[in-house]
Image (cartoon, rainbow, N blue to C red):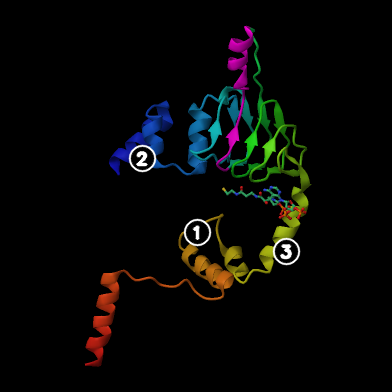
């Protein structure tokens, strides 16, 4: 515990022990974004961002990140790796590096790949698995390979709001502070599982638990 907090302090303050910090402290997205904002060698990182330790940035120096930008496990690519091969094979001296400029309020989904020379406009969503090769317009949802607009974030919010209000646990969501409440989570999980599978999660016992349970029942009968 003391070691963890020491490693976190050293990493946050001086940018040292980064590998140990990731392994030992397993920082959540918001904390890790703050670490990268201070020490990640990005062009810049805004406030209220979330970046996972599994998110890949090949060239952070060319990446600008706005405020409230959330990354899942995805890859932001800043250069074309084929250039080194071409330089040797053709005896040429090529260069192909580009910026990735991500404006405010953007979410980038799981396994998405953003290629160099792309600007992602504000209030946009990049769907899971998308390969972004061109600029993403402000307010757009893009998906697919190559990524193309499939909708507007404003419409998605309206649909999600209506769908959330219809949930059997809508009242709990309204009471929840922030996006995750560890005290409320077990109750929410039980309600969701019961609704998804129309019965609660089955309880599995280990052999020892099962034996002592049976023994308890038999002892109660005798
Ligand atoms: C894009 C996303 C936000 C949903 O947007 P949506 O507007 O609700 O999309 P819908 O589910 O209504 O689908 C609209 C169309 O887009 C398609 N689509 C949705 N998500 C897609 C995706 N990831 N890739 C390709 N196509 C997708 C649907 O198949 C549908 O196509 P159709 O009209 O031909 O049937 C969601 O699918 C997504 O990818 N979320 C990210 C999830 C994620 O990465 N989580 C990480 C956890 S950290």
- Is label 1 within 8 A of ligand 1 (CB to nearest ligand atom)? no
Residue at horizontal 70 percent and vertical 60 percent from the top:
161
Residue at disc 3, CB closer than 8 Å to ligand 1: no
- x and y percentages locating residue 178 in the rendered image: 56, 55
10 Å neighbourhood of mark 2: few (<14), some, or many (≥20)? some
**SS state under label 2:** helix
Task: Tell me, yes or no, whether the highlighted magenta stretch contains residue 83.
Answer: yes
User: Magenta segment, which residues?
Assistant: 72-91
Q: Nearer the viewer, mark 3 or mark 1?
A: 3
Taking the spot 61% from the left edge, 20% from the top edge, the residue there is 82
**91 vs 193: above or below:** above
Is residue 130 covered in magenta? no
Q: Which residue is mark 3?
A: 162
Q: Residues within 10 Å of mark 1 (few under 14, many from 20)?
A: few
Quadrant of the frame with the C terminus: bottom left
Asked if labels 2 and 3 touch by Cβ distance under 8 angstroms, the answer is no
**Which image quarter: residue 170?**
bottom right
How dense is the environment of label 3, judged by Cα within 10 Å: few (below 14), some, or many (20 and up)? few
Disc 1 target residue: 181
Of the numbered discs 2 and 1, the one sitting upstream in the chain is 2
Quadrant of the image containing the N terminus: top left
Query: Is the shortest distance between ligand 1 and the CB of mark 2 under 8 Å?
Result: no
């Amino acid at each position: 515990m003391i070691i963890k907090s020491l490693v976190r302090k050293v990493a946050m303050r001086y940018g040292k022990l980064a590998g140990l910090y990731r392994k030992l402290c397993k920082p959540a997205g918001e904390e890790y974004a703050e670490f990268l904002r201070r020490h990640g060698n990005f062009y810049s990182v805004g406030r209220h961002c979330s970046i996972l330790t599994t998110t890949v940035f090949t060239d952070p120096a060319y990446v600008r990140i706005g405020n409230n930008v959330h990354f899942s496990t995805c890859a932001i690519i800043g250069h074309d790796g084929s250039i080194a091969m071409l330089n040797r094979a053709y005896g040429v001296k090529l260069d192909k590096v580009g910026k990735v400029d991500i404006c405010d309020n953007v979410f980038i989904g799981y396994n998405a790949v953003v290629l160099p020379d792309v600007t992602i406009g504000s209030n946009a969503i990049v769907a899971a698995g998308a390969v972004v090769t061109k600029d993403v317009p402000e307010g757009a949802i893009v998906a697919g390979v190559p990524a193309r607009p499939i909708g507007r974030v404003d419409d998605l919010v309206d649909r999600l709001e209506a769908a959330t209000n219809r949930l059997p646990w809508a009242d709990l969501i309204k009471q929840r502070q922030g996006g995750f409440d560890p005290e409320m989570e077990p109750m929410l999980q039980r309600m969701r599982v019961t609704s998804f599978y129309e019965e609660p999660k089955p309880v599995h016992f280990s052999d020892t638990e099962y034996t002592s349970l049976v023994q308890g029942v038999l002892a109660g009968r005798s």
